[in-house]
Amino acid sequence: MAANAYEAVERAARESYGRLLAFLSARSRDIAAAEDALADAFSAALVNWPSSGVPANPEAWLLTAARRKLVDAARRRQVREQSMPALLLAAEEAEARMTSPSGLGDERLKLLFTCAHPAIDAAIRTPLMLQTVLGLDAGRIASAFCVSPAAMARRLTRAKTRIRDAGIPFEPPEADEIAPRLDAVLEAIYAAYGSGWDDVAGGSASLRGLAGEAIYLGRLMTALLPDEPEARGLLALMLHCEARRAARRETGGAYVPLAEQDTTLWSRELAQEAEQQLAKAALADRVGRFQLEAAIQSVHAQRAVTGHTDWEAVALLYEGLVRLAPTIGGLVGRAAAVAEARDAQAGLALLRDLPEASVTTYQPYWALAAHLFARLGRRVEAGHAYERAIGLCDDPAMRTFLIGQAEMIAASKPSNTVH
Amino acid sequence: MQYMLLFYSTPEEFEARDDPEGRKAFRASFVPYMKALQDAGIIVNGAGLQKPGTATSLRLNGDGGHHVQDGPFADTKEQLAGFFIIEVADIDAALKWAARYPGRPGGGVEVRPALPQADREALYKMLAES
């Protein structure tokens, strides 16, 4: 019974938290004050629901509790905070709407666009979304991004203060600026997923533990903006990567590169859902970065059916991707694909073209360079590149894999065969 | 900014240093890590330390004397195994390097900012003048 109530609070937290916070802060523009009120309401639920039972309408219960907390706070502080009256009004309006047929509506899209507003530092956009839309605490977000929890909490507070004080509007952007603004939202969601999955031979696969949250936000975007192909592209990309999760590690935890993954361990359901999203996106006939990245993963997914990878297709898609968005990840991914489609020399040539400063500490670059040198039998260069890839690696399973590869090439017979 | 990366190891990890296989595994992961730091040009200083049992600690008494004891200062399972002082832009960059530390589970890294450069320079100046 009690466990049931805790689960109900958790479910309500995931489903309602963002909607309630979006509604309240869209009117008061004070995210922090709305968060405080909702946090109190959720802790009241944790105290009350296990004994009194889960209310028929949990969302309405939470709102009433939040409003009560706001009234108390307003009394205590003599309405010192300018946003308190607006927040109270918003809570009352929300409560009234709960009982009307039109309901509370969903204003999370406004919240998402506000979090990714150009006036907000790009590095804090993803944490801000995770906290406001999903209610994640600063400590968990900090660990996922390898940032100090105190610093993360400070940055989140600063961003919310900025939204309030700069009067950043809680509105979706106008039609003429929707593309760049939407891109910023999608980019921030993708950052929560963690980029760099299997793109590169031995590249870094950062398992950040927020994949579920990112996919939730991705689904939310496609529900809120069903006509945006890039939102579907992003969801398809994440689902394709997620489909391979079980195949990425052996039972003992050892890293398995994409080319050696057992395709029977790939989730067919997730891959199919990804394909459906990609097909729907294609109907809009507006290609974009995320659709291209999803298409690359779609080609890889084909191996489960055909038994081989069409590297020419992957290379071609990367070509399109780096023209659209020449990120270092995309450029290294293209080199990997070209190496597979043509030969290792061609891949290395593309790697050599990259500006040195952008790759010094970019681990996937060194992992790929090492792999290609090894294939060409250039053992000394391979050794150096493996060393750098190992030194920059932040994933123990990947590190162990790379150390194994490096030892293998060091122990192999010197040869000049080029293949 | 200068940050100190303090590497902490479990007793098992210290033990592993004594066995040839363990030492080989340690070198295979730690040498590349050191080289990556070196090639990034950010190392100010650093050292690996001998086992905690080799430490001698002086605890200052209230009466002006001191109590000398064998062993490290803090009686914790994880003990200081080595350190680097690195010069990087900010704490985020320092944590990125800490995340690459190839230690064993149970151990880890403490990242601490050094006193601001102005304070350090004032101290050096005082030393030079005295």
Image (cartoon, coloured by chain):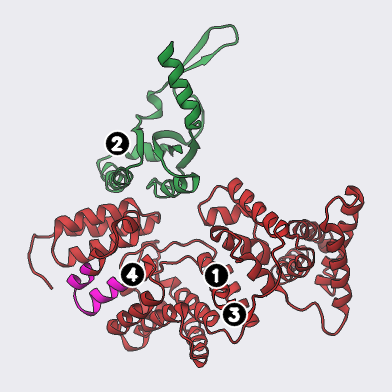
Most foreground residue, A24 or A402:
A24
Q: Colour of chain B?
A: green
- Give me the C-alpha separation between circle 1 and circle 2: 52 Å
Mark 1 belongs to which amino acid?
A: Ala
The answer to whether A16 appears left or right of B46 in the picture is right
- Give me the C-alpha separation between circle 4 and circle 2: 44 Å
The chain under label 1 reads A
Residue A308: tell me if it is visible.
Answer: no
Q: Residue A331 got which mark?
A: 4
SS type, badge 4: helix
- Give me the C-alpha separation between circle 2 and circle 3: 66 Å
Estimate the x, y position of residue A250 in percent, counting from the top left. Answer: 38, 66
Q: Residue A73 got which mark?
A: none
Mark 4 belongs to which amino acid?
A: Leu
- Report the magenta residues as a range: A332-349
N-terminal-most mark, 1 or 4 = 1
- Give me the C-alpha separation between circle 3 and circle 4: 30 Å
Provide the residue designation for mark 1: A184
The answer to whether A265 appears left or right of A172 in the picture is left
* Label 3 environment density (alpha carbons within 10 Å; few <14, some 14–19, many ≥20): few
Provide the residue designation for mark 2: B18
SS type, badge 1: helix
Provide the residue designation for mark 3: A176
The chain under label 2 reads B
Chain in red colour: A
- Give me the C-alpha separation between circle 1 and circle 3: 15 Å
Q: In terms of image quadrants, where is residue A127?
A: bottom right
Mark 3 belongs to which amino acid?
A: Asp
Residue A206: tell me if it is visible.
Answer: yes
